[in-house]
Image: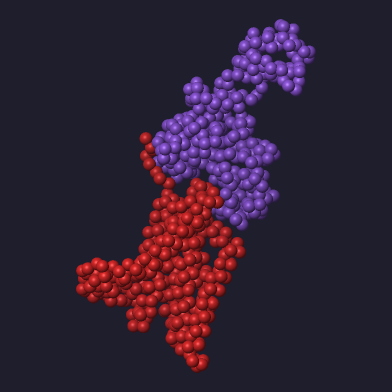
Chain colours: A red, B purple
Amino acid sequence: MRDINPVLLRELRGRLRTPRSYWLLCGALFLVSSISLLIYSAEYASMNGQPTFNGSSGHTVFLSLVVTALVVVTAIAPIMAAGSISGERERQTFDLIVLTQLRPIDIVLGKTAATFAYCLLFVTALTPFMAITFLIGGVDVGELAMMYIVIMSTALLYTCIGVYWSTRTQTAITATGYALATILGMLLVLPVLVLVLPEVLPGWIADSTTTWRQLMLAIHPFATIIFTQDAIRTSTVWTNQYTIFGVTIAGPAMWVMSVAVSWFWSCVCSILSIRRLTPPTSKGAS
Amino acid sequence: MIEFRSVSKSYGKTHALVSLSCVIPRGATVGLIGPNGSGKTTALRLLTTLITPSSGDIIVDGISVCADPTHVRQRIGYMPDTFGVYESMTATEYLDFYARCGTMAPAQRSAIIPSMLARVGLSDAAQTAVMSLSRGMAQRLSLGRALLHNPDILVLDEPASGLDPRARIELRTLLHALHDEGKTIFISSHILSDLADLCTHMLILEHGKTVAYDTLANMTRFTQQQSISVALTHPAPTIIDVAATCGYSAHQTATDLLRYDLTGSTHAADRAALLRALLAADIAVHTFAPQEAALEQAFLQMTSTDQHMQETPHA
């Protein structure tokens, strides 16, 4: 049987042996629970003294949990991943790892999996809170699973972006800056483009504005969650109607596209990271 | 065998290494010396494939570092000048991590790690956190890591830097043993006395250029001047004139009026002629001891002026 990836093992042990990880996890859970408590209280207050929650209230609390979890993952994943390889450079251990028989793919996968595992730990720790909303009602198991998949796919993408920048920079702080700038660019600039482009560009884009917007926003997890709520209301969880060149066709639902796009770009970032770590070869310089 | 073929490395307009060419026989212990910024670390990093040459190539046992760095890496154990640590790792876990990275089987790992710790004298520190190891212990652990996969070639960048005398002696003993096992060893160091004790070959670099590459014996033979310490039983001021007739200059030491330092030719025949002349002049010579600081003298002579670079024979 093949051994577990040594980089993954070392990263997990290294992280979980220091109190920093516990404090970070506790802080994130405190944030999520506080916000959900606030929403819960607000919902309760809006009942005008009638102490009866309905499905809509449970769904609102659930959505607040999902959005907060997504915000936390958006912060944790790139910050942790950005220090993975550049941190090795700072500790002056990078050369030693590179000179072992580990392949660049092993190093990149180990680093990615370690950060992803930490995000998974956080999302798993959210389960009791999610369970409460599930018991209140208004949320079914399918929606719960769907949101978990979207959150984890987002965590994977942001981890890969962090690892990619980590391979390109000498210090963790620089890598973190670039990774956060990339992700904030995706989160903030993309919606602006989605709103502006169809107005500026004439022709078929204007004809299929909604499709265009949905395609562009597939990389935006927060937009995906909003669009998915519409899909759940209309009971079209797996498929969606798209209009391209005036033709309406059925395609995968927005959240499925979002997950697929996240996985695709995660692969692209990982391949680029592996290429950065692969020693250049030549026939010998002249 | 390792062959540097006109290897150069430039960073923009800065030439870190210029056309280094030399052949290192299997089992040699090569000392790299030179002032700071002379290209020693660049040469070592090129050999370990951590960086690629701007031009030229290095052939390690028939494998080009440019064409096949992965296979070259399997033959090399590298000990950098700094000891990078992972937090919260014991010495055993540190070696275990690198053994796993070397794709060693669990049974092999559990056998080799205790023996490696014993070899580098760290059995008692097996469960000590690497962060709390002394500099000397950390260096030995780093050497143990470099030896885990039993490489043919060891590349050591400033291994003795910052070590106390005991740690230096222990490290030197370990390196002697590795040399006896037939490993080819590269050592970059500023401590010339250690290199003189360990090395079979010397490579002197300055401003990225090769000043000299030769066996230690040839290198020290090249030294143009040698100091001879002469102690007398009775005062004899005529020693200065007699030495001068043989081409040596004599200076009385400040601490002992009966002791003189004679500086001149390194040739054994000239030294013999000098001794004969002193005895013929009835100078009561008690001791006549050529000094062993030849490597330091050679280094100083060769790196002091550009003229020496032209005069020194290249390998």
Q: In this view, does A41 lie to the left or right of B245?
A: left
Q: Residue at (43%, 75%) from the top-left corner?
A: A147
Residue B157: x and y in percent read 56, 39
Q: Residue at (45%, 30%) from the top-left corner?
A: B21
> Disc count in the image?
0
Residue A119: x and y in percent read 50, 67
Residue B127: x and y in percent read 66, 54
Q: Is residue B60 left or right of residue B281?
A: left
Residue B312: x and y in percent read 51, 22
Q: Which residue lies furthest to the bottom in this view?
A: A50
Question: Looking at the picture, does residue B189 appear above or below residue A6?
Answer: above
Q: Residue furthest right?
A: B234
Is residue B30 among the parts visible in the rendering? no
Question: Looking at the picture, does residue B164 appear above or below residue A242?
Answer: above
Question: Looking at the picture, does residue B314 appear above or below residue A194?
Answer: above
Question: Looking at the picture, does residue B299 appear above or below residue A118?
Answer: above
Q: Residue at (50%, 65%) from the top-left corner?
A: A76
Q: Quadrant of residue B228?
A: top right
Q: In which quarter of the image is residue A273?
A: bottom left
Is residue A200 among the parts visible in the rendering? yes
Q: Which of B168 and B278 is in front in this view?
A: B278
Q: Nearer the viewer, residue B16 or B83?
A: B16
Q: Residue at (47%, 56%) from the top-left corner?
A: A175
